Image: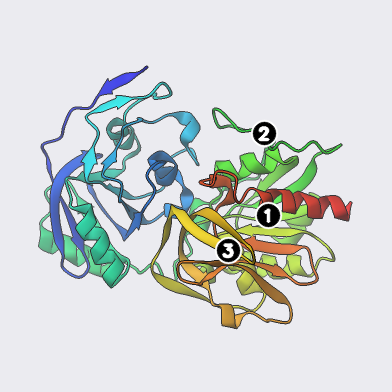
Amino acid sequence: MREFAVRPSTTAALLVLADGTVLRGEAFGATGTVVGEVVFNTGMTGYQEVITDPSYAGQLVTFTFPELGNTGVNGGDQEADRPHARGVIARQLAPVVSNWRAEGDLDGWLKQHGVVGIRGVDTRALVRHLREGGAINGAISTDGTAPVALLEQVRTAPSMQGLNLAAQVSTATPYTWETPCAAGFDTRLQASPERPYRVVAIDFGIKRAILDRLVAHGCHVTVLPADASLDQVLAHQPEGVFLSNGPGDPAAVADGIALARDLLQQPDLPLFGICLGHQILGLALGGRTFKLGYGHRGLNHPCGSPGAVEITSQNHGFAIDADSLPADQVAITHLNLNDRTVAALALRDRPVFGVQYHPEASPGPHDADHHFARFTALMAARR
């Protein structure tokens, strides 16, 4: 068992919201001031996955679980090579890290990567405020900046609506993914086709766990940047194309929407989208998206199809307007059972589907993993 003592901080920190709310706490992580959209995540575990998930780019994440850092940090739990959340808001930081997989502590890791944190905040009150008023821009400051100056920075910061953040987090160069990276990788659902399925994944902010699940189901994955063209995709002779998760406003990802429209013109080419990729599919099909009040972020969201319920992991602030989709072409196959928003869709006569939630995150633990098998089954049928 590895243990790391965490030295408590005595540096004051501020959280200032655009509506003038000021919360005071103590600093941890890096020193500085960061501005972003303040959101909350209801998961009881997985703080390192959340902080490194590119879908959290531009956001200050409030964790509703009252204590962070118990299990430390390790390289196997990262969804990218660095954190993407701009700031971390916590009720309490664990004074001792104790876990056999730990390679360091959360506080030191955030310092290393320049992520600012505030602890000692009444996160229950903050989450209630966000639920009632909606996600809102805010600033975390640990460098002594005055509240009035912070409020000015927050109020002049851009809204998440209209931001194309996918272009900022996407890979700059193509790469391939053939073997899983995560420690303790689950191979129980491993598929064994005679030869791997050739999949091109468009990186709008892709998680490593998604790549791992595609590999587990028998895929050889080539990852291309968010601005990839149809010719660049087809040059790899894909048997299927995957549209990834990612941050920001889906309606602002013009290159991705244009590519999805072009891909929909390819006869019988299987397409699969998760989260932002699902929304991009909906937009390419003529639908509209809208911003949710405070988003869906956590590990306990029930989604249903007729006769079945999946417990799902979610992380999104936008959703597809169900009434905007062409009903003669698109079936809404799953609904979020909390608010009846679109949780999954499929074309009625084509091998194309998308899910709003994250089947790779496995809170069920395998409630939703069948979506990867569905994708490979479509490619097998095309063969």
Q: Residue at x 30, y 46 (%)?
A: 65
Q: Position of residue 188 (x, y in %)?
A: 67, 33
From the viewer's perspective, is 239 left or right of 32? right
What residue would you read off at disc 2?
A: 188
Most extreme residue toward the right, as rendered? 383
What residue would you read off at disc 1?
A: 242
If you read the primary sequence from the N terminus, does the residue marked by circle 2 or circle 3 appear first? 2
Q: Position of residue 151 (x, y in %)?
A: 17, 65
Q: Nearer the viewer, residue 63 or 160?
A: 63
| Identity, as a three-letter code, of the amino acid under mark 1 | Phe
| Identity, as a three-letter code, of the amino acid under mark 3 | Gly
Comparing labels 3 and 1, the label whose residue is closer to the camera: 3
Q: Residue at x 64, y 59 (%)?
A: 273
> Marks 3/1: CA distance?
23 Å
**Callout 1: SS:** strand
- In this rendering, the answer to whether 181 lies above or below 252 is above
Which image quadrant for residue 190?
A: top right
> Marks 1/2: CA distance?
22 Å
Q: Nearer the viewer, residue 249 or 233?
A: 249
Comparing labels 1 and 2, the label whose residue is closer to the camera: 2
Q: Residues within 10 Å of mark 1 (few under 14, many from 20)?
A: many
* Number of the label disc, if any, that sits on residue 304: 3
Q: Quadrant of the N terminus?
A: top left
Q: Residue at x 47, y 58 (%)?
A: 301
Comparing labels 2 and 3, the label whose residue is closer to the camera: 3
Which image quadrant for residue 307?
A: bottom right
> Marks 2/3: CA distance?
25 Å
Q: Residues within 10 Å of mark 3 (few under 14, many from 20)?
A: some
- In this rendering, the answer to whether 226 lies above or below 280 is above
